[in-house]
Amino acid sequence: MRVASFRASLASFSFHTRFYAAGKPGVPRAGFKAHGDIGDGRNDQQQLQSANPYKSREHMNHKWLILMCVGCLAGGSAAGHLTEVDETALKPPFKKSDVLSNISKTFEFRPDLAAMGVRVAFLLAARRAGLTTDSFDESCAVARGLEDIAGVFQQLGTMYHISTEDAASLVAVAALKFLKAPSESIENAWRWGRNDTDEAPPRRRRNDEKFPVEASGVQSLLKGLCDLTDAECVALLACHSVGEFHEHVSGLDGATHIGSRYKLSNEYYKFLLSNEKRFFDLEVPRTEENKEIRRLPKNFVCVYASTGKRGKKKQCVFNRSEVDAILKNSTWRKLAEYYAENEAAWAEAFQSGFTKMIDSNFKRLRPYDASTD
């Protein structure tokens, strides 16, 4: 064993000795032969330099080398920007059907997250549009209670490498399906490629110059989301019929809009019109659960209505501005009456408006191919 180790060390020493000896000036490198015309002139420094192509400082000036590298980088960058790319051929790193299936299983276990998923779709659209709330309390109320749905977005991002905006829009689509709302054309029109950004867009108030002075808060808010028509605005308001109030958000616990929680349909308009004369102002009581809310809402109206098969009366609560926007605006009232009688017309306007909303105000919404299933 010692003899073998000594031989290996000796061989290594011999190799390195030959290597360093070959690198000394004036010592011919083994295996290298100069041209025949040069002759023996190894002692001539000029000929030695001419015959040694291995020194970069003699072979090429460093400035020219740097300029060549910069030129290559610039040419490559220009080629990348000028070359046409067929973006429709690019595929997402996930299958839409797999993501929707995963989300639907979550909703079966937590149906309240379906209503929250629809709520987040509106909040993100308002953020992208640069809309702001009128007060600090209202801003806090808007953002409260979103921890659980944020966990769903994070899980989807980890599993499918999907952007948060894409995940939020697919959660909204899955929520509509779970809530038995019209969603087929929304799902078919869905495209991937929404970019996330940490940069908030320029803020603007609801009473921006873009909107008429006489417009209500609800009207200006919906109009500010994107290019929605009146028909689409009224159709989207039916989303208020799902979910329920929470004490840590609104000060109320368990109250609903129309007596049911997890079905989105044109029943919303029927309920409003049939109970129009019965609404009364509601004062939200101060409780232990809502003590963190500095100013409790003072713009709620309420009605006790018989709902469900048993006909049990339930407390149904609306925002006063929401009721007035629909029932006191002649154009919107006619649309509400029309939707109450014609569910197909409501479904068409609803899907059109919801598709616009989840696709609105992106700096770059890539038109990538949707054939991911």
Image (cartoon, grey):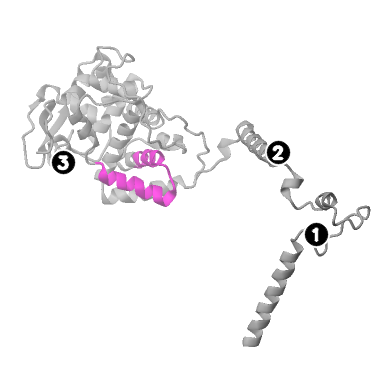
Label 1: few (<14), some (14–19) or many (≥20) C-alpha neighbours in 10 Å: some
* Distance (Cα) linking label 1 and label 2: 29 Å
Q: Nearer the viewer, residue 23 or 26?
A: 26
State the residue at coordinates (30%, 24%): 222
What is the x, y in percent for residue 74?
63, 34
Q: Secondary structure at mark 1?
A: loop
Above-or-below relation of 115 to 349: below
Q: Secondary structure at mark 2?
A: helix
Label 2: few (<14), some (14–19) or many (≥20) C-alpha neighbours in 10 Å: few
What is the x, y in percent for residue 201?
36, 27
Kindly identify which numbered label has been placed on residue 309: 3
* Distance (Cα) linking label 3 and label 2: 86 Å
State the residue at coordinates (91%, 53%): 38
Residue 169 found in image quarter: top left
Residue span colored magenta: 146-174
Q: Is residue 159 visible?
A: yes
Q: Nearer the viewer, residue 310 or 108?
A: 108
* Distance (Cα) linking label 1 and label 3: 105 Å
Residue 157 colored in magenta in the image: yes
> Badges 1 and 3: C-beta atoms under 8 Å apart?
no
Residue 259 colored in magenta in the image: no
Label 3: few (<14), some (14–19) or many (≥20) C-alpha neighbours in 10 Å: few
Residue placed under numbered mark 1 in the picture = 26
How many marks on residues? 3
Callout 1, which amino acid?
Answer: Gly
The secondary structure making up most of the magenta span is helix
Q: Nearer the viewer, residue 97 or 62?
A: 62
Kindly identify which numbered label has been placed on residue 64: 2
Residue 258 found in image quarter: top left
